[in-house]
Amino acid sequence: MSLAELLASLAVLGLVMAATVMFLTSGQRAYLVGTARVESQQTARMALARMAREIRQAGFDPADAGFAALSVFEPKRLVLHMDLDADGVIAGRPETITWLLGADGVLRRDAGGGAQPVINGVRSLSFTYLGADGASAVAPSEVRSVVIKLTTGPEGAPTRRDGLTTLVTEVRLRNR
């Protein structure tokens, strides 16, 4: 075997190894993007299900005290009330719940113990409040259903459009 043959075989081996490393790197990157997307979708579904459950319960009033189901109904913040202990008074930690989206892209839920983070990577959250006729409600007492639109994406890529998940649901208040 001559020196020229050895150099040629090393050059071919180097090309094969470089192609293999590039292939493995792109595969690993695709795997990481896929798992981040799946995690983003799962957390968005979990948050939406929890929000919907609590909105359905809003206005629960077994003592018939006549309190409002919602006190704040803004496009990015929602404050709802329910009388869980049936004493006719909305007081205590679990009976007033606030959902809001912070400027840092963290969806937070405050049930009296501070605004606890629910999910990260939220790109947008909007609440639309509808009355009994399906038109936009203008007062908290008119709200009969809430349309929630939640868009999340993998963390670490705030400007990328691919991988975004948008979930939309309409939740009817059972107690109004």
Image (spheres, rainbow, N blue to C red):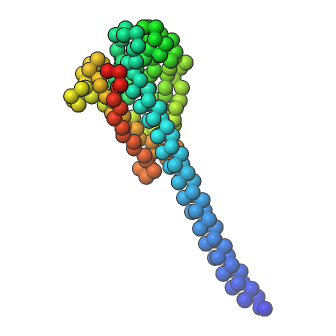
Residue located 44% across and 35% down the image: 48
Residue lying furthest front in this view? 62
Question: Residue 66 falls in which quadrant of the image?
Answer: top left
Question: Residue 89 falls in which quadrant of the image?
Answer: top left
Residue located 74% across and 85% down the image: 6
Residue lying furthest right in this view? 1
Q: Is residue 16 left or right of residue 119?
A: right
Residue in the foreground of this view, choosing between 85 and 139:
85
How far across and how far down the image is residue 133, in percent?
21, 28
How far across and how far down the image is residue 96, in percent?
45, 17
Question: Image height check: is 165 above or below 16?
Answer: above
Q: Is residue 13 left or right of residue 169?
A: right
- Residue 156 seen anywhere in this rendered image of the structure: no
Residue lying furthest bottom in this view? 1
Q: Is residue 5 left or right of residue 101?
A: right
Residue located 52% across and 32% down the image: 118
- Residue 143 seen anywhere in this rendered image of the structure: yes
Where's the C terminus, which quadrant? top left
How far across and how far down the image is residue 25, in percent?
60, 62
Instruction: Say how many tags the image has.
Output: 0
Residue in the foreground of this view, choosing between 67 and 5:
67
Where's the N terminus, which quadrant? bottom right
Question: Image height check: is 144 above or below 37?
Answer: above
Residue in the foreground of this view, choosing between 77 and 134:
134
Question: Image height check: is 20 above or below 95?
Answer: below
How far across and how far down the image is residue 20, in percent?
63, 71
Residue located 24% across and 26% down the image: 132
Question: Residue 18 falls in which quadrant of the image?
Answer: bottom right
